[in-house]
Image: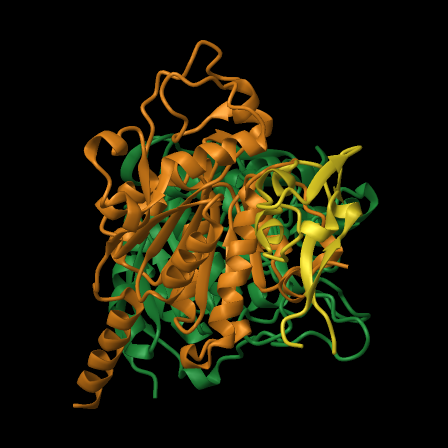
Chain colours: A green, B orange, C yellow
Amino acid sequence: MSKAVLMQGNEAAVEGAIAAGMRIFAGYPITPSTEIAEQSALRLPQVGGRFIQMEDEISSIAAVLGASVAGVKAMTATSGPGFSLMQENLGYGAMAEIPCVIVDVQRAGPSTGLPTSPAQGDYMQARWGTHGDHPVIALSPSSVLETFYLMVRAFNLSEKYRTPVIFLMDEIVGHMREGVELPNPSSLIINHRRPSFHDGANKQCYYVPEGQLVPAMKPFGRGERYNITGLAHDESGFPTNNTQVAGKLVSRLLAKVEEHTDDIVRVEEYAMDDAETAVVCFGGTTRAVMSAILEARAAGKKVGMFRPITVWPFPEQQLKARLPQLKNILMVEHNHGQMLLEVQRVTGGATPVSFLGKVDGTVITPAEILAKLQEMEV
Amino acid sequence: MPSDLIHLYMRIDHLPHIWCPGCGNGVIMRDVAVALDEIINDTDNDIDRDDIVIVSGIGCSSRAAGYLDFNSIHTTHGRAIAFATGIKMANPKLHVIVLTGDGDCSAIGGNHLIHAARRNLGLTVICFNNDIYGMTGGQYSPTTPTGDKATTAPYGNLDRPFDIALLAAGAGASFAARGDVFHARETTEIIKKAILHKGFSLVDVYSVCPTYYGRKNKKGDAVEMLKWQRDNLIPMSRFNVMTPEDMAGKKPIGILAENDFPEYTEEYAKLIERCRNKNRK
Amino acid sequence: MIGRKKLVIETSWCKGCGICAAFCPKQVLEIKKEKVTVKDPEACILCGMCEMRCPDYAIYLVNLEE
């Protein structure tokens, strides 16, 4: 039986993760993500899981990757400064194909910035923070309840595509308290790992059989010994200097996400059916945008909201599908224009794109969005 | 064809290894294989081969993970102990052995080393300590003696070196020991004890790098460097009865710290039990 | 006979470092053209020192069958 509880976004992230099967949390305190560590420390031993406070964020993500290799779903949570420290091992997770979830509750930067004022300045870092070409899946919730469900999805996608998933929250959603009714965990669909290599002749640990997305992932300790490395490797899991093999590997890693955007990408559209102006936003900015749209609609203006829930890969097809009906687009985000670059790339100059952003740690208000729409002569 | 031991415990398709002629790392890797062979075959231990996980970082030493035929993970530079922490936390039944080097574990990974030691999480760290960064061509490391030369210390090293075994002991390691390449049998015994020790254990094994450290510092070839180990690294039983004059300039090898501290995952298991009992009430 | 052993060299794995020859208690081995060779097979006492010290696993003892 579900029941209504008052809950913070950060707490919902933990409850969602536990519902998805997370049983190891390794992290380091940092505002505004700290409640995720605190709640994990409280909740995990109750469900037979384990929490460990590491010495820094580098070791936190390393421990999470290690736990995943040993067969347990694992998560860490941090904010901008810690997210920067995690970048190298995030790439390791992508290269070695180790599922895990990394929560970044964004705060105003750069550097130590404005703890703990809201911002969304890590959007591009989530995509390009680690070196080298690599696949990225990043999801961004806009409410407490959505944080719960989207976290389940984050773990599911991570297992399905064998890649780290970035859960891009922000201070607004992390510290937002709402009354939510959490579902019965048994009603959720949970992806489990295929815990053995394939039947048949090819038992190489990085061999992808016909019709499969990724290699099977067998936990350490259950036979069929194998090797994992962050070096370019062949299907046997051993390092190679063969450029053809290395090229094929990286192409496969990129393709498994790029070729399945239909499955991975989710957007929320509100009042878009007859919209001539789309306000694009994500995460904690959504609430102010929604409020502004309701007011604009009440004034008879044809404004709708286009909100990527999957923020990486960017919902390119979904936005393109709306372009014929749109006279203009307003991008609203708590940064200097990061998702804006993606919107401009997708529109290719055909649709005018205006921008409203902030880098001072204050929240964008509905009034400011309405004023911007006015300025655009919407 | 190699010997039965090598055939059984190493991935011979990937041998001979990449290490230079005379490099001590091959001997240390063999010591680890012998120790594991003896541990696995002693039924009193009840340790299955699949319960062993080898974790390494980056550097010459860390290539050992790929050669040893166990579950193995070759991680990022300095982070082997942190990866190992996650593996052990996720499955405390596993025997997690970190193979690392002086740079990997005491420079870039120094923070993870001291905190793993402090927590007393049941890992075994075996440091292949060759006093130099070999993989990148001979830069000074945290264990390069003061005054010695390296490509980044062309006028002699100004830093004071770490003693990694004492560092771990100081950080609270419940088992800290020192071994070397020359005393292979003694070092193998120490490694065995370290793996069987309940709690965090570290063995700082003095390797030799004739290619970079030896050549740069006129220490002679691999043979000369091993003779130096023979004459200056003294098994504890012998060291303890030496006169102060004879001890001068020499170091003991053997177990430097051994304590029965609560092991982290065992304590966590008790915590889980407490939480469950509370829920039942 | 129990414990009959034989010295084996895997020449392709030998990197010619000379450690085995230097520490052989009976001076059985020598390095020729950067590879280890047996100079005095009669003197070998099958102690296994070379196997323990070889960093490249290129020299070792095998137990002989009956």
Residue with the most extreme front position: C42
Q: Is residue C33 visible?
A: yes
Q: Is residue B198 above or below residue A253?
A: below
The quadrant in which residue A222 appears is bottom right
Given residues A245 and A266, the one toward you in this image is A245
Q: Is A201 in front, or is A111?
A: A201
Residue for point 57% across, 51% down: C49
Relative placement, left or right, of A285 versus A228 is left
Residue lying at 28% horizontally and 41% vertically, measured from the top left: B167
Judge from the rendering whether residue A23 lies leftward or rightward of residue A326; answer left or right. left
Between residue A373 and residue A51, name the one nearer to us. Answer: A51
- Name the side, left or right, on which B201 lies relative to A93: left
Tell whether A35 sits left or right of A320: left
Residue A36 position, x and y percent, is 31, 59
Residue A347 pos. (x, y %): 69, 39
* Position in image of residue B152 (x %, y %): 49, 17
Q: Residue at x 83, y 45 (%)?
A: A244
How many discs appear? 0
Q: Is residue A105 visible?
A: no
Question: Which sits in the foreground, A2 or B64?
Answer: B64
Is residue C18 depicted above or below B80 in this figure?
above
Which quarter of the rendered picture does the C terminus of chain C lie within? Answer: bottom right
Quadrant (top left/top right/bottom left/bottom right) for the N terminus of chain C: bottom right
Question: In the displayed structure, would residue A69 be above or below residue B225?
Answer: below
Q: Position of residue A277 (x, y in %)?
A: 58, 45
